[in-house]
């Protein structure tokens, strides 16, 4: 069975059906320039098999994606003259994911550029923070335990 999805735009880039400005490739990943960059040099890194996001990505793709990001980010910075970069991964429509094939964004950033407006940050009240902390820790422990039993 092909690891690609015939309806997915990034799979079409992988299969060569549509072109892309490729900058890097290894066994597990492909990187190319975003067609509508927040800043010039905005790069996307994708796994070479179709998956939606971090949760359903095989471990080797996950490792390879972050390895490729570590390799590419300093080069993109150097070439664009950027002062910093955002490493971004939108997971799910609610988080702004438009292409349902997992990808990391490397977005070059310049001092005071207007990219990625900052939303106001919230404040916990009362016990909210401690309750969430406890829920996350419990759920994580249960998950780890069930994985150990498999
Ligand atoms: P998302 O919002 O899903 O995290 O980001 C998807 C990104 O893919 C967007 O920044 C968008 O500009 C880029 N993109 C969508 N279609 C194409 C395409 O056909 N070619 C390239 N190079 N980038 C694309
Ligand atoms: Zn795909």
Image: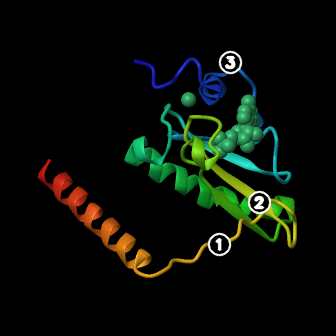
Q: How is the image coloured?
A: rainbow
Q: Is residue 148 left or right of residue 71?
A: left
Near-viewer residue (1 or 51): 51
Q: In what element is the residue under mark 3? A: loop
Q: Is residue 8 left or right of residue 131?
A: right
What's the residue at 78%, 60% (across, down)?
108
Instruction: Answer few, some or many: residues within 10 Å of disc 3's Cα (few below 14, many 20 plus, some between 14 and 19).
Output: few
Instruction: Answer few, some or many: residues within 10 Å of disc 2's Cα (few below 14, many 20 plus, some between 14 and 19).
Output: few
Residue 97 rendering spot, x and y as whole percentages: 62, 42
Q: Is residue 61 left or right of residue 86?
A: left
Q: How many marks?
A: 3
Q: In what element is the residue under mark 2? A: loop
- Location of residue 130 by image quarter: bottom left
What's the residue at 56%, 17% (across, down)?
6
Name the mark on residue 121.
1
What's the residue at 59%, 26% (across, down)?
11
Mark 1 or mark 3, whichever is nearer to me: 1
Name the mark on residue 17.
3
Near-viewer residue (117 or 75): 117
Name the mark on residue 116.
2
């Amino acid at each position: 069975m092909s690891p690609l999805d015939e309806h997915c735009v990034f799979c079409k880039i992988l299969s060569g059906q549509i072109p892309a400005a490729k900058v890097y490739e290894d066994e597990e990943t492909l990187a190319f320039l975003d067609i509508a960059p927040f800043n010039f040099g905005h790069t996307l890194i994708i796994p070479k098999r179709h998956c939606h996001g971090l949760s359903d990505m095989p471990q080797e793709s996950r490792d390879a994606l972050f390895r490729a990001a570590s390799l590419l980010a300093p080069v993109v910075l150097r070439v664009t003259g950027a002062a910093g970069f955002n490493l971004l991964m939108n997971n799910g429509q609610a988080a702004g994911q438009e292409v349902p094939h997992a990808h990391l964004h490397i977005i070059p950033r310049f001092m005071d550029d207007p990219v990625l407006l900052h939303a106001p940050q919230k404040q916990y009240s009362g016990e909210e923070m401690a309750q969430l902390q406890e829920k996350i820790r419990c759920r994580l422990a249960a998950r780890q335990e069930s994985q150990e039993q498999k």
